[in-house]
Image (cartoon, grey):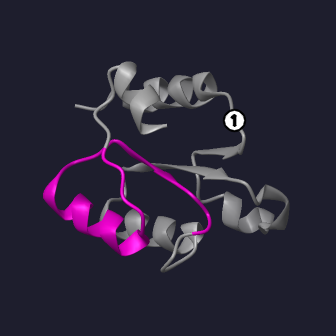
Amino acid sequence: MKLILEDEGFNVNAVYSGFAALEWMNDKRYASAILDYVLPDMKGDELADKIKLEYPGMRVILLTGFLQAIDAKKLEKFKYVFEKPTDPRKIIEALREITRDFR
């Protein structure tokens, strides 16, 4: 996904845990974050809560293979929700919409 998004002109950082993501966010300003639901150190909705607390304007996208197992209330935290496998064009379209006004 990182390579596809970079080919589309997006600046992408990929990390593999919730705490690593929060660390990266301390150093840079991001328009959005794409999260998996199952991370090694926390669930995606927990990370979304932490992101929204620290960076209230950031839009969070969920990309998961476990959509049916996630409580619908938890899904409300996300601007977009995609179930794996997902056509990358849908994610690109969502990111373009999100980043249109990001400066």
User: Residue farthest to the front?
Assistant: 3
Asked if residue 15 lies left or right of residue 1, the reply is: left
Asked if residue 18 lies left or right of residue 22, the reply is: right
Q: Nearer the viewer, residue 59 or 1?
A: 1
Look at the numbered disc 1 and give the secondary structure of its residue: loop
Q: Which residue is mark 1?
A: 86
The magenta segment: 13-38
Q: Alpha-carbon neighbours of circle 1 within 10 Å: few (<14), some, or many (≥20)? A: few
Spot occupied by residue 22 in the image (x, y as percentages of width and height)? 31, 68
Q: Nearer the viewer, residue 69 or 2?
A: 2
Q: How many marks?
A: 1
Q: Residue at x 21, y 48 (%)?
A: 29
Magenta-drawn stretch contains 11: no
Q: Residue at x 34, y 41 (%)?
A: 31
Spot occupied by residue 45 in the image (x, y as percentages of width and height)? 58, 68
Asked if residue 78 lies left or right of residue 70, the reply is: left
Magenta-drawn stretch contains 21: yes
Q: Residue at x 28, y 33 (%)?
A: 11
Asked if residue 27 lies left or right of residue 42, the reply is: left
